[in-house]
């Protein structure tokens, strides 16, 4: 096998490219296969609003050049209320960010192959030993990593992940100028990332405005096409229609125009508990698992954390004098994922279901409760602390909770 690497990674998204950076820094031979062409990269995969926080920037050494705007506030809106929290963040230019990760990985010694769509695993004795890509090409590795996002051609073929259609969230966003960022009837969104809970605009999901400087912002929305969405949705409206409806009805967009030359950002991610994430010679990272935080869709930091956990695991397996990449050894990755990357995933999924089950009225009350709650309760609730979540529940939520319990029993989920 002449085309052999220590690690083969499919997909140059934040997860795959970060994993390559970490592995190349430890002098492993690593190749990344990316379906898009190098000239256009990233085009279809330029999908993200890319709102992130200092912990991600510092942990992964992300330079200022890829930041469009540093933000100081996170604002939550409901139809008639809002809640403002002081929290620093950064809205990245996602395309520049992706290109930086590739460039930096290359400088550290990683090899990149573009126009290299991965189609299936190459198997030997029921174990993956390489991948088929770009039609009939093959490349081999001691460890293979699927970082292709929701496409997941390898993880699906190996039955490592079970991405469910009814758990797929879809999102769309445009970039605008001429937005009234500090409109008199709304919270001031200057240097803010704003998320809006309002079933009229994003049934069973949420919409957002992320300020990118002066009168410009990224404006988008997302939802899961499940029972909740159908309950609030209007017949025949697509996700694009919902975005246009918001643009037509919210006075902040009265003079807004799409910024010339900018493309739509659109994509999907699954909001569910992963079945598994590794097997012999194989790991799945980022949105392939899925790792994205269910509540607010923070997928970049989480995906990169899962990439680092996979790099640590590969290092652990390959540094032995007699390297071993069995499922048992690689299960360290699963442990790191559950302990460090996405702890309390189950509680956060429950919170997510509860949140999107609630009515617009309840969202208004939630904003008032959030404004009154102490910071410690909020922080613990956000991390999935059950006691803190209970503090934010009200007596009138009992029917909501019983409905959630009934739905969960009916769907056979715990
Ligand atoms: C509209 C929208 C807004 C979002 N906003 C935010 C936000 O504000 N903050 C945040 O943290 N997250 C946000 N996210 C989520 C975030 O973008 C994702 O969680 C993150 O990009 C996942 O990274 P990844 O590397 O796992 O996968 P991806 O970003 O999906 O990257 C996968 C890569 O694999 C490539 N690929 C796909 N199939 C193949 C194949 N068969 N062979 C080879 N290569 C392949 C793709 O071209 C791509 O480069 C948003 C997502 C969407 C859709």
Image (cartoon, rainbow, N blue to C red):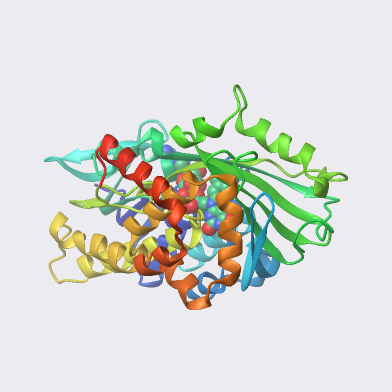
Q: Is residue 37 visible?
A: no
Question: Where residue 237 appears, x then y in whole percent?
Answer: 62, 26
Q: Position of residue 141 (x, y in %)?
A: 27, 52
Relative vertical location of residue 42 with respect to residue 389 in this rendering, above or below = above
User: Which residue sits at x=12%, y=67%?
Assistant: 322
- Against 179, residue 371 (above or below) is below
Q: Position of residue 300 (x, y in %)?
A: 50, 58
- Residue 154 position in % (x across, y down): 31, 41
Q: Residue at x 21, y 64 (%)?
A: 332
Q: Residue furthest right?
A: 255
**Left or right of residue 278: residue 196:** right
Tell me where residue 151 sits by quadrant. top left
Q: What residue is rendered at 65% in x and 45% in y?
A: 220
* Residue 168 visible from this viewpoint: yes
Answer left or right for 319 relative to 251. left
Q: Nearer the viewer, residue 34 or 85?
A: 85
Q: Between residue 89 and residue 127, name the one nearer to us.
A: 89
Q: Nearer the viewer, residue 74 or 341?
A: 74
């Amino acid at each position: 096998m002449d085309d052999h690497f220590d690690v083969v990674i499919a997909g140059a998204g934040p997860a795959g490219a970060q994993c390559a950076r970490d592995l190349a820094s430890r002098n492993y031979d690593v190749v990344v296969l990316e379906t898009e062409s190098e000239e256009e990269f990233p085009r279809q995969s330029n999908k993200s609003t890319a709102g992130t926080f200092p912990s991600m920037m510092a942990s992964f050494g992300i330079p200022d050049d890829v930041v469009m705007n540093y933000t100081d506030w996170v604002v939550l809106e409901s139809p008639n209320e809002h809640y403002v929290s002081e929290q620093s963040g950064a809205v990245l230019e996602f395309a520049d960010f992706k290109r930086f990760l590739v460039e930096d990985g290359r400088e550290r010694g990683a090899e990149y192959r573009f126009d290299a769509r991965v189609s299936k695993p190459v198997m030997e004795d029921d174990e993956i030993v390489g991948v088929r890509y770009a039609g009939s090409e093959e490349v081999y590795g001691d460890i293979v990593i699927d970082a292709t996002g929701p496409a997941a051609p390898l993880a699906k073929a190996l039955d490592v992940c079970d991405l469910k259609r009814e758990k797929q969230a879809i999102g769309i966003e445009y970039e605008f100028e001429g937005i009234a960022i500090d409109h008199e009837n709304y919270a001031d969104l200057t240097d803010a990332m704003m998320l809006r809970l309002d079933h009229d605009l994003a049934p069973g999901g949420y919409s957002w405005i992320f300020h990118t400087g002066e009168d410009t912002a990224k404006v988008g929305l997302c939802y899961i096409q499940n029972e909740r969405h159908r309950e609030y949705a209007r017949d025949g409206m697509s996700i694009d229609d919902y975005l246009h409806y918001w643009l037509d009805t919210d006075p902040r967009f009265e003079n807004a125009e799409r910024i010339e030359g900018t493309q739509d950002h659109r994509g999907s991610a699954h909001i569910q508990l992963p079945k598994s994430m590794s097997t012999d010679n194989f790991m799945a990272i980022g949105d392939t698992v899925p790792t994205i935080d269910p509540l607010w869709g923070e997928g970049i930091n989480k995906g990169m954390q899962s990439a680092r956990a996979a790099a640590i695991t590969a290092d652990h397996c390959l540094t032995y004098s007699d390297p071993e990449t069995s499922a048992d050894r690689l299960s360290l990755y699963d442990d790191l994922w559950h302990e460090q990357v996405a702890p309390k995933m189950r509680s956060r999924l429950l919170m997510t279901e509860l949140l999107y089950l609630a009515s617009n009225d309840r969202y208004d009350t939630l904003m008032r409760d959030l404004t009154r709650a102490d910071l410690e309760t909020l922080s613990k609730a956000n991390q999935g602390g059950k006691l803190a979540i209970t503090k934010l529940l009200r007596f009138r939520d009992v029917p909501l909770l019983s409905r959630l319990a009934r739905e969960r029993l009916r769907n056979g989920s715990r």
